[in-house]
Amino acid sequence: MLRRPSNGNAMSQMPQIREAEAPEAAALIGWITQLRRHRWLGIVLVVVSLSLAVGYLHIATYKYSAVLALTPADQSGQKPVGNLASLGSLVGVDLSSQAGSGFAMYAEAVTSYPVAKSLSERAALMQAIFKESWDPAAQQWREPQSFVRSIINGVKRLLGVPIKAWAPPDGHDLQNYIEKNVLVAEDKKKSLIRLTYLNADPKVAVELLAGINFEADNFLRARSLERSTRYVEYLERRLAEIQVVEYRLSMAQMLGNYEKTRMMASSDASFAAEAFGDIWVSPNFTTPNPWIVLSAAFIAAVALWIGLALFVLPLIAYLRRQSSAG
């Protein structure tokens, strides 16, 4: 038969449990007391933090998101295998990376200087992106006035650091802007690249992404056309020299592949990547999110209040007592 524990044993264990819980309960009560004592500090911090957040939301620049999805364009891309690939390496021509190589380099081309340099020739786009340096009334570039820049230049003068003279935005400036503001997300499993860009003007966002795609594709097209043309000329010379039938057949097939690549690069169709639908633009602004800003301000104020009430203020009071006692 099972025995029930006697009431006497249960009652004897209760004081031990209460003694074990007593320090934790006392500490919790102490924390609550401290928070209640400094409750006005918490209210002030919350009000100030939310006021700053609301002020930020009034002056913040609200931006829209533009997204361009890209997939590999058909480059005729029959990859050479077997004897053909071996022959390509024998004659000094790398065929293994020809098919689809344009899309593999597309992500790098997006942030490259040649693409940015070509884009910088679009005056309207440059004026929209670097609008703080463009004077629409005078229709010319001007150095923007910046208090922070003046302080930095003053510090540089004191330290003897050379100060670079201001110049109108160019391809280098646009390249830095694209690297910082255009997100390039590459999904190699799906062979998909997404370009994401935020701007206060949705039309500027669409224009920049479309321009990047156009110039990057043209840049890779030109490189491929130049390379395939050189290979075609080389293979034609080798065909005139080689008499072995098997080599001639293999080289003729190689020549055909490069002729296809050259044909694709010479057409008006997308060469390296093609858009997977139109550029998507968010119907409403995506940043900053007012609810996230207000929630973060409230949480930060509460965390600061707890830190001050439980740790900083008691430590200051303790130090004062020690100094007065000494």
Image (spheres, rainbow, N blue to C red):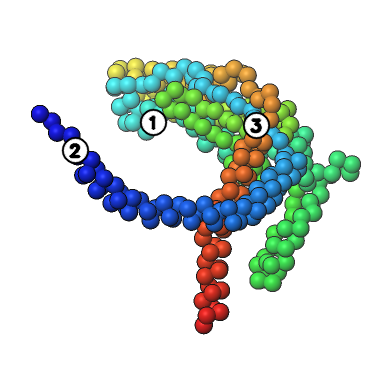
Q: Depth-wise, is mark 1 or mark 3 nearer the camera?
A: 3
**Element at badge 1?**
loop
Tell me, for residue 286, which label it has, or none. Answer: 3
Query: Left or right: where does residue 16 sit relative to residue 154?
Result: left
Q: Is residue 146 above or below residue 209?
A: below
Query: Tag 3 or tag 1, which sits nearer the N-term?
Result: 1
Foreground pick, 97 / 241? 97
Regarding residue 207, the answer to whether it shows in the image is no
Front residue of this view, candidates 30 and 130: 30
Which residue is more in the foreground, 146 or 314?
Answer: 314
Q: Is residue 118 left or right of residue 254?
A: right
What amino acid does circle 2 point to? Pro
Q: Report which residue position mark 1 lands on.
A: 94
Residue drawn at x 72%, y 58% as measured from the top left: 148
Q: Residue at x 69, y 67 (%)?
A: 155
| Rendered image quadrant of residue 203 | top right
Name the residue type under label 3.
Thr
Q: Residue at 52%, 80% (x, y): give it.
A: 325
Q: Residues within 10 Å of mark 2 (few under 14, many from 20)?
A: few
Q: In 3D space, how far apart are the residues under numbered discs 1 and 3 (Cα atoms)?
A: 46 Å
Q: Residue furthest right?
A: 137
Describe the element under mark 3 as helix, strand or loop: loop
Rendered image: mark on residue 5 = 2
Estimate the x, y position of residue 118 in percent, counting from the top left: 66, 36
Disc 2 versus disc 1: nearer the observer: 2
Which amino acid does the dot numbered 1 rest on? Asp
What percent of the width, then of the height, locates residue 316? 55, 68
Q: Secondary structure at mark 2?
A: loop
User: Closer to the N terminus: mark 3 or mark 2?
Assistant: 2
Q: Residue at x 13, y 30 (%)?
A: 2
Cβ–Cβ under 8 Å for marks 2 and 1: no
Q: Quadrant of the N terminus?
A: top left
